[in-house]
Image: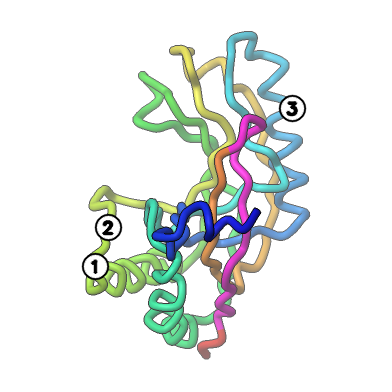
Amino acid sequence: MDEKAIFPYDSFMSMRLFLAMPLPAAVGDALSDVMSQMRRSVQARVRWAPSKGIHATLHFLGQHDDSLVSLLDEHIAPIAGQFRPVEARLGDVGFFPDAAHPRVVWVGMEEAGGVLLALRDRLGREIHDLKLDVDPRPWSPHLTLARLDVPLPASAFVATVPNVRFLVDRFCLYQSDLTPGGARYTELRSYPLIGV
C-alpha cells in the first residue's frame, strides 16, 4: 500500500543529522586495535564504537525535517573552499567528562595550526545563523571509542595508541539512524577541503 495514502499529511521525513570528518581505513584499523587492547582489561558492559563508523564529529544538528539538507548544503558548501586539507595524527586516550568520572572514552586528533578548530568555529557560525543550536562547550578533535553504561575507572582502559598520521581532506553531512544493532550512518553530502 502507498505510504502517502496512509499518511497523507506527512510531506516530510524527520532526519537525525550531524557534520563530521570521515577517516581513512588505516585510522579505523588502528583504532580497532586500540579497542581490542582495552577490551582485554575491561570486564563491565561498555558500548564500543564500530571501527568502520568512527568519525570526528564537528556539529550534532539533531532531528530535523529533510528540507534542512538542501538549506545546509547551500550555506556550508562554500565554507569547504576556505580551508585546505590538514595532516593530523592520533593523540592520547581521553575521557568525558573527565578521567575521574569517565562516561565516554576517546582518542584525540592532533594537528598543527588549529585548522580543524577554525573549521568547526566557521561552520558553527553558519549553523547559528540558520537558527540551529550550536554546542557552546569547548571542543577539540576527538574520536569516540566507547560509552560507559556503568562507572569504571579510567585506569581500566589501557592501550597504546599508534603514531598514525593521516590527511583530513573533507567533511560530510551524515544521517544517523538508531537501530537495535547500534547507530547506522549514511553520508548525505561530502565537502572536499579545496582551499589553498
Question: Is 186 within the magenta?
Answer: yes
Of the residues shown, which amino acid type is indicated by label 3?
Ser
Q: Which mark is residue 128?
A: 1
Name the residue tied to disc 2. 134
What residue is shown at x 35% (from left), y 52% (from top)?
Answer: 139
**Cα–Cα gap, marks 2 and 1:** 6 Å
Horizontal side of residue 13 vs 136, given as left or right: right
Q: For residue 157, what is the image quadrant?
A: top right
Read off the magenta span.
179-193
- Which is more N-terminal, label 1 or label 2? 1
Of the residues shown, which amino acid type is indicated by label 2?
Val
The reply to whether discs 2 and 1 touch (Cβ–Cβ < 8 Å) is yes
What residue is shown at x 62% (from left), y 58% (from top)?
Answer: 2
- Say what secondary structure mark 1 lies in: helix
Q: Which mark is residue 36?
A: 3
Q: Does 68 appear above or below 46?
A: below
